[in-house]
Image (spheres, coloured by chain):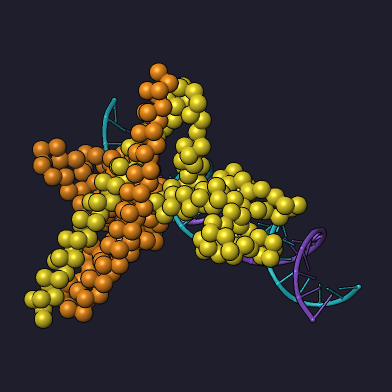
Chain colours: A yellow, B orange, C cyan, D purple
Amino acid sequence: MDKILAKPAEKKQELFSIAELADEFDISTRTIRFYESKGLITPDRVGTTRVFRRRDRTRLLLILRGKRLGFSLNEISDYLELYDADQTQATQTQHLLERVNTRLAMLRAQKTDLETAIAELEEMQGYAMEQLKKQA
Amino acid sequence: MDKILAKPAEKKQELFSIAELADEFDISTRTIRFYESKGLITPDRVGTTRVFRRRDRTRLLLILRGKRLGFSLNEISDYLELYDADQTQATQTQHLLERVNTRLAMLRAQKTDLETAIAELEEMQGYAMEQLKKQA
DNA sequence: CGCTTCATTGACGTTAACGTCAATACATGT
DNA sequence: ACATGTATTGACGTTAACGTCAATGAAGCG
């Protein structure tokens, strides 16, 4: 499969095998198939074999970032929908806007939590360094 | 139990029942007992009944914030240890400092992710609002 | 052409983080 | 004293997010 997909001279790789993506993102192929079964990604097929385009590669990036931020796959699924929402009709755009705003509120709340935690640890850090000076 | 623990005239409540805390933090008593079984909190007992002090109440706050940030209970357990570390010996303080720094790096990385996600959504928000103007 | 190497598809196992339920024990208001 | 309400301790169930394994198939290599 490598031979088929690999085009070393190209600037931007367009197609990816499941193994390539698993390797690049340091996840298992099982995980990728699992995400597909959940509808988070929708690779093409060549026969039975999956072939991934840039779109799904990007979605994988978003999925993994979502996970790092502590979101469930269901939440991430909602989040991904925002990226390919229909913008042709005003009602759809309006709906999208509401969902984006809801999401933004969540992320901003999380950011506040995060900043509080960071501030606390920085305080501990400062105190610990003080202690070390005294103890030296 | 309320009658025993409740001292309405006091400024700072010192003792809490499991139900009070469950209510205040909007979690189940089962969850609180589960956290105790994991060693995250260590309430006193009056007979068989749990009695919580401010310390464990604070720890509950930290646990829940940790969860909102997407950390596992094991990670949170590590995190909590930072709060009651031994600072009397320089080697302990040194060790604490290292762990605090590690934690800080994680949180800062997460903050970067978060800010990226927020920026993307803000861009979508801007674009959607543009669309709505055009479509109006 | 046989061998070896991925890829796919079930099916089943696993871990974390609780929920649910049953049996039992206190404690309180009337 | 009794009914009611709350607490505790198992034991078992559940969901999410994969891991593991077995059987099968297509593809390239010498």
Seen from the viewer's position, the closer of residues D1 and C28 is C28
**Quadrant of the image occupied by residue A98:** top left
Residue B51: image location, x then y, percent = 26, 51
Above or below for A90 versus C16: above
Q: Residue at x 19, y 61 (%)?
A: A122
Q: Residue at x 12, y 72 (%)?
A: A131
Q: Quadrant of the N terminus of chain A?
A: bottom right
| Number of numbered discs on residues | 0
Seen from the viewer's position, the closer of residues B31 and B76 is B76
Q: Is residue D14 left or right of residue A49?
A: left
| Residue A56 seen from this side | yes
Residue A4: image location, x then y, percent = 69, 61
Q: Is residue B21 left or right of residue A94?
A: left
Q: Residue at x 37, y 28 (%)?
A: B130
Q: Residue at x 20, y 57 (%)?
A: A120
Most extreme residue toward the top is: B136
Residue A76: image location, x then y, percent = 48, 44
Q: Quadrant of the C terminus of chain A?
A: bottom left
Most extreme residue toward the left is: A134
Residue B103: image location, x then y, percent = 30, 63
| Residue B60 seen from this side | no
